[in-house]
Image: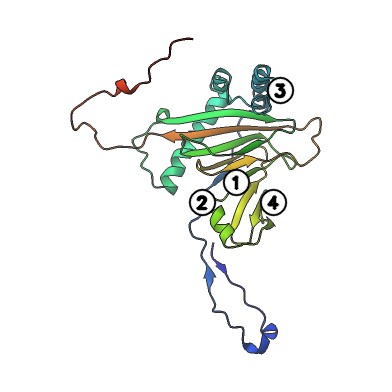
Amino acid sequence: MEKRVSEPKSEKIPNNEFRPAEGEVIPAFSIPFLRGKINHLDQESMVNDCREWVSESKSRHGNDVGKNYTTYFDHDIRNKIFDTEWGNELTDVLKDTYIKFINEIYAQPVDYLSRHDVHFFPWVSVYNTPHQHDVHNHVNSYMSGTFYVLGGRDAQPIKFFSPALMSNFSHNIQNEMIQDQDPQIKWMGSPMVHDEMFFHPDNGDFLLWPSYLQHMVPPNNHDVRGDYERIAISFNLNHIPHLEDGRNGTQMSYDFMRPEEQPNE
C-alpha cells in the first residue's frame, strides 16, 4: 500500500524555507505472510486429543520444560494426529493452502505434484505454565506455520524478527511498540520500518510464513491463571522441486557415501 509523506501545515513553516519535495513511500521487498481461519473442524476433539498427546510426552520428559509441553520430540506421539478424522482434514486443507500460496506468490510450478508429494510435518504444543520457545527458524522446510486450536486475548503471541534487523539498526530507526489497526498485530520499530511483529492468535487462526524467518513465543507476561491454556499445532511444509531429466552422464549409486555404523562399545 502506498504511503504519502505528510506535509507540515503552511502556518508552521519558518519563513517558507522548509520545502521538502512531495513524494510517496514505496514499501518494497515485503515478506509474504498468509493469515487465515479454519473454523469447520471439531474443536472439542482437537482440544482433547492435543491435551492427551502432550500429556503423554510430558510423562516421558518430566520436568524438562524444553520438551514436556510439545509432541515435537516424540515421533510416535506426533504422528497420532494422522489417526484422527480432524487431523487428516487439517492436513488436506493446509497442503492445498500451501500449493495455492507458493503458486500464486512465488510462481512455483505445482501441476506435477499431488497431495502425497507435499511433505507435511506437524506437532502440538500446549502452553499452560510459564513455557516459552526461544528464537529459532525451521530447516529442511520451505514454508512453516501454526494453527491455533486455543488462543485468545491473553494468549502468548508469536513474535517474528525482520531479516533486515541489522540494516535497520544501522539506520538508527525509532524503536517503540506500534499498535496496528488490526487489534491482533503489534509492531516494534517505526511506522514504516519494523524490527519485530507480534501476532496475538484467536481460536481457529493460522499463519503461514517462509521458514527462514526467525521467530519465538515469548514468556507469558500475564499472571498465569490456573486455567490458562494456549494450544497450537505448528507445521512445516515442503516439496521436491521439478528438475530436468537427470539421466545423463554415467549412472552410479552414491551409497558408498553412507556413514559406517559404529560398533557398540
Mark 2 Cα within 10 Å, few/some/many (few <14, many 20+)?
Answer: few
Q: Which residue is mark 4?
A: 183
Q: Is residue 186 positioned above or below 201 on the image?
A: below
Mark 4 Cα within 10 Å, few/some/many (few <14, many 20+)?
Answer: few
Q: Please identify, in this view, whether the residue under mark 2 or under mark 3 is nearer the observer.
A: 3
Which residue: 26% across, 23% down? 253
Cα separation, mark 3 vs mark 1, equals: 28 Å
Q: Please identify, in this view, whether the residue under mark 3 or under mark 1 is nearer the observer.
A: 3
Tell which of 252 and 246 is nearer to you.
252
Question: Which is nearer the N-term, disc 1 or disc 4?
Answer: 1
> Which amino acid type is shown beneath numbered disc 4?
Pro
Q: Which residue is mark 3?
A: 63
Query: As drawn, is 207 to the left or to the right of 179?
Result: left
Cα separation, mark 4 vs mark 3, equals: 35 Å
Give the quadrant of residue 127: top right
Cα separation, mark 4 vs mark 2, equals: 20 Å
Residue 54 can be seen in this image: yes
Q: Position of residue 84 (x, y in %)?
A: 57, 21
Q: Please identify, in this view, whether the residue under mark 4 or under mark 3 is nearer the observer.
A: 3
Q: Which residue is mark 2?
A: 31
User: Do the residues bearing badges 1 and 4 touch, measured as CB atoms within 8 Å?
Assistant: no
Q: Which residue is mark 1?
A: 160
Q: Position of residue 264 (x, y in %)?
A: 47, 9
Q: Position of residue 91 (x, y in %)?
A: 51, 30
Question: Which is nearer the N-term, disc 1 or disc 2?
Answer: 2
Cα separation, mark 1 vs mark 4, equals: 17 Å
Q: Is residue 34 positioned above or below 56 on the image?
A: below
> Which amino acid type is shown beneath numbered disc 1?
Phe
The dot on residue 119 is none
